[in-house]
Amino acid sequence: MARLPLIAILRGLTPAEAPAIGQALVDNGFVLIEVPLNSPEPLQSIAALAQQFPQALIGAGTVLNAQQVKDVHAAGGRLIVSPNFNPAVVAQALALDMVVLPGVATPTEAFAALDAGAHGLKLFPAEMLSPATVKALRAVLPQDVALIPVGGITADNMAAYRAAGANGFGLGSTLYAPGRSAEQVKRQAELLVQAFGAVT
């Protein structure tokens, strides 16, 4: 998070694409990469990325239960990202010494996730959580908690969320979409890293 708090969300990635797409991201400074579990053969992609890029924190998104956490860990993943807060998912990730970022949308969910031991909070879906909402959450949550809006984040709206107190972002279709080449992903990664740098 300290190096570059941008999470690459590679929904739809295939194992065959994983090395080239991963390289395009790592070359641009990305160190947080998630493969959502509703992608084709996600555990194979996670295993390939974790083996090729040990310097990065590789893991899974759309993790919904404790067994999936175990499966990701067995594949070499060290990062668990969820669309929701499930205490069992957080507990299993902590038991396996993995970084866990549950999804929350309300103060109640946020404080419950932190009480359970979450390392940071995925604010999801960001389309429903305006910068004003993020600012309100930032005012009541501990200042050292990482707030990471996900969903609809682009180079154009990062600055408003950063000004409201967001620490980083999850980047999905604005960065990667099925069928997009490694060169295209590289160009998008460059743009997004530049945009983030411009508002730090």
Image (tube, rainbow, N blue to C red):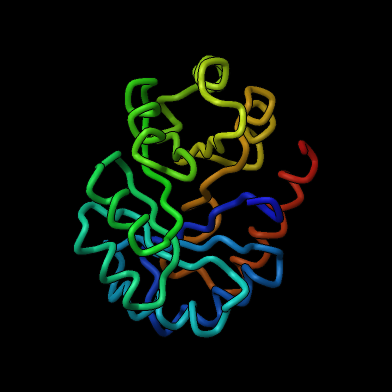
Residue 141, x across and y down, in percent: 51, 23
Q: Residue 181 versus residue 14: which sits nearer the camera? A: 14
Residue 65, x across and y down, in percent: 20, 54
* Residue located at (40% from left, 70% from top): 13
Residue 72, x across and y down, in percent: 32, 69
Q: Count numbered badges in the picture.
A: 0
Residue pushed farthest front?
95
**The image quarter in which residue 14 lies:** bottom left
- Above or below: residue 131 compared with residue 30: above
Residue 129, x across and y down, in percent: 45, 24
* Residue located at (44% from left, 83% from top): 48
Quadrant housing the C terminus:
top right
**The image quarter in which residue 168 lies:** top right
- Above or below: residue 65 compared with residue 122: below
Residue pushed farthest right?
198
* Residue located at (32% from left, 77% from top): 74
Q: Residue 96 versus residue 79: which sits nearer the camera? A: 96
In this rendering, position of residue 165 left or right of residue 110 = right
In this rendering, position of residue 114 left or right of residue 21 = left
Q: Residue 101 versus residue 15: which sits nearer the camera? A: 101
- Above or below: residue 49 compared with residue 58: below
In this rendering, position of residue 160 left or right of residue 179 = right
- Above or below: residue 162 compared with residue 182: above
